[in-house]
Amino acid sequence: MSPSSSGKSNLTALLQGASTAGDAKLVRCPTEALERLRNLHEAEVITLFTPFVPHPPNTTLAKDMDPFEPLGRALPRQVRHVPYRLDNGMTEMHADFLPTSGAVVIVICVTTNIINYNKQAFEQQLRFARDISRRVAEDSSITGIPVIMLLVDNDAAGQAYAAAMQDFPTLVTINDYTTGALANAVRVLFGK
């Protein structure tokens, strides 16, 4: 990645220049989960699970960059970014990352470009999220760590998607997964 004329990378410039992109909203979050997330010890890792999906239309990201890499870079703690395939769901490899997690962020991306390609995308991603959440609840060493759902949707079905996720106490929504939108989701969660 080549730095811009100011010496910043293109990704850094995009992250810093996004003020309201994505219409980020904290739909619900228990106070104790939010406090725990915002006060993670510096040694605690945020495990970020993201779906394997194509770049958003009109992206400015390099084609060889994961579309959710800007989200990982925007999080203010050490991040372990672990993609998941919609058709495979949770594997033992995904579960192996959980015991060292201080928090878990799971992205569900159901924008029009994803749903037009895969009509089952929401159900597949929701199954993955529920499997991860169940594993966290079953492991006594990590029970109680924050599990944050980030729902990315850009159509009229957004409220139905959010309603189908009532079993997750923490939900943030954005309406696209551009660099700016992802950075704003982090701002909403961390209050920065």
Image (cartoon, rainbow, N blue to C red):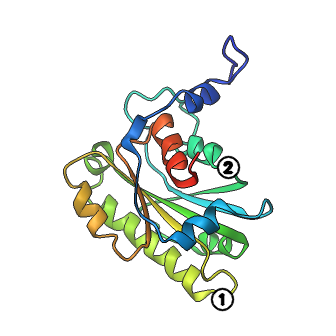
**Residue wearing tag 1:** 140
Query: Could you tell whether 159 is left or right of 23 in the image?
Result: left
**Residue wearing tag 2:** 76
Q: Nearer the viewer, mark 2 or mark 1?
A: 2
Indicate the quadrant containing the C terminus: top left, top right, bottom left or bottom right: top right
Q: Residue at x 66, y 89 (%)?
A: 140
* Nearest to N terminus: mark 2 or mark 1: 2
Q: Secondary structure at mark 2?
A: loop
The kind of residue tagged 1 is Ser
Residue 152 at what x, y percent from top left?
38, 51
Residue 130 at what x, y percent from top left?
44, 75
The kind of residue tagged 2 is Pro
Q: Residues within 10 Å of mark 2 (few under 14, many from 20)?
A: some
Q: Is residue 157 visible?
A: yes
Q: Which mark is residue 69?
A: none
Q: Nearer the viewer, residue 139 or 93?
A: 139
Q: Nearer the viewer, residue 7 or 42?
A: 42
Q: Residue at x 39, y 40 (%)?
A: 22
Indicate the quadrant containing the N terminus: top left, top right, bottom left or bottom right: top right
| Residue sitting farthest toward the right | 43
